């Protein structure tokens, strides 16, 4: 008979399962609606930007900081606070407890927010796929592409999504054979047939589309997408005028 699990073993397994679940849920978080990515207007320079501890343009501290995890601006009388304030509603700098290194926003002094936000911050590796800038390199908000689910900055958001559904091939055929590709990966820009969509590395979850055998991203059926195999580039023609 197998050995009976001890209490410490059960706690360790439960912790590993929670960490695995939090990493899996991080990819499904709506980044645009998360408190760490809220719209913020600076009190001094009046410029709009992403929720930050300090203004990106003038480096000033805001009067009402917003928590990057729970989104609150006022801490009520609660027992969860690391810094106790009985009978007082704390606001401003009295409410904050830390600055997140990933999203550059304030985290309130609540025990739950301080202990969980750094592990589940959706902007941990939020480098723009187009310009390769991180959160600390620009003042705008962060978004995800609707097709390839890569991170995008506010400047490249619309331009990237307009050209994202273009295959890196001349036809819709499978990259491994000449059959028509039923499954498309919008991250690799490639099509796969039913046989070559099966991967030995990435496991397919029950009830979901097969993952891309190249990158592991979830594929979608080609017939449901408006995929194109032709790319167009706008070329500007310059004219030279001579005056006599």
Image (cartoon, rainbow, N blue to C red):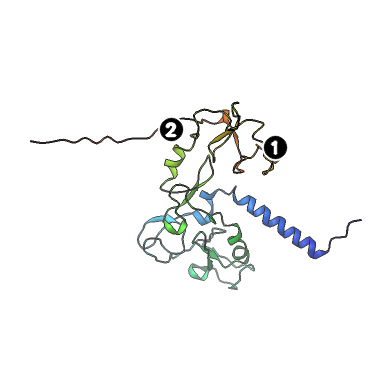
Residue 146 at x, y percent in the picture: 52, 41
Pick whichever of labels 1 and 2 is earlier in the sequence.
1
- 1 or 2: mark nearer the eye: 2
- On screen, residue 192 versus residue 58, left or right, reads right
Would you place residue 243 above or below residue 65 in this image? above
**Quick one: SS at disc 2?**
loop
Q: Which mark is residue 207?
A: 1
Please identify the quadrant where the N terminus is shown. bottom right
Q: Nearer the viewer, residue 41 or 200?
A: 200
Identify the mark at residue 231; answer none if there is no mark. 2
Q: Secondary structure at mark 1?
A: loop
- Measuring from the top left, give residue 44's x and y in whole percent: 36, 63
- Compared with residue 150, is residue 67 higher up or lower down, i.e. above or below? below
Residue 108, label in figure: none
Q: Residues within 10 Å of mark 1 (few under 14, many from 20)?
A: few
Identify the residue at the far front of this view: 177
Whether residue 103 sits left or right of residue 111 in the image: it is: left
Task: Tell me: residue 179, above or below residue 143.
Answer: above
Q: CA distance from mark 1 to mark 2?
A: 33 Å
Question: Residue drawn at (75%, 62%), measured in percent from left and top?
Answer: 12
Residue 111 locus on image (x, y percent): 62, 67
Mark 2 crowdedness (10 Å alpha carbons): few <14, some 14-19, many ≥20: few
Left or right? Give the position of 98 relative to 162. Answer: right
Q: Residue furthest left?
A: 244
- Which quadrant is the C terminus positioned in? top left
Which residue sits at x=83%, y=63%? 6
Q: Nearer the viewer, residue 58 or 145?
A: 145
- Most extreme residue toward the top is 179
Query: Which of these two is toward me, 155 or 125?
Result: 125
Pinpoint residue 165: horizontal percent, then vertical percent: 49, 35
User: Residue shown at 56%/54% (left/top)?
Assistant: 122
């Amino acid at each position: 008979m197998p050995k009976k699990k001890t209490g410490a073993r059960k706690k360790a397994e439960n912790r590993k399962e929670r960490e695995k679940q939090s990493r899996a849920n991080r990819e499904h978080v709506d980044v645009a609606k998360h408190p760490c990515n809220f719209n913020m207007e600076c009190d001094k320079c009046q410029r709009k930007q992403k929720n930050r501890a300090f203004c990106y343009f003038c480096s000033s501290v805001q009067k009402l900081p917003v928590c990057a995890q729970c989104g609150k601006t006022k801490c009520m009388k609660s027992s969860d606070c690391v810094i106790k304030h009985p009978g007082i509603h704390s606001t401003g700098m009295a409410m904050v407890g830390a600055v997140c290194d990933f999203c550059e926003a304030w985290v309130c002094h609540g025990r739950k927010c301080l202990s969980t936000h750094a592990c589940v911050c959706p902007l941990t590796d939020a480098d723009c796929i187009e310009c390769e800038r991180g959160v600390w390199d620009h003042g705008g908000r962060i978004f995800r592409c609707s097709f390839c689910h890569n991170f995008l900055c506010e400047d490249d958001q619309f331009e990237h999504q307009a050209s994202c559904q273009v295959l890196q091939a001349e036809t819709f055929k499978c990259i491994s054979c000449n059959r028509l590709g039923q499954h498309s990966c919008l991250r690799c820009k490639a099509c796969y047939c039913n046989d070559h969509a099966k991967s030995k590395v990435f496991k397919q979850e029950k009830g979901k589309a097969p993952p891309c055998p190249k990158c592991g991203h979830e594929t979608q059926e080609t017939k449901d997408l408006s995929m194109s195999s032709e790319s167009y580039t706008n070329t500007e023609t310059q004219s030279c005028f001579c005056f006599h």
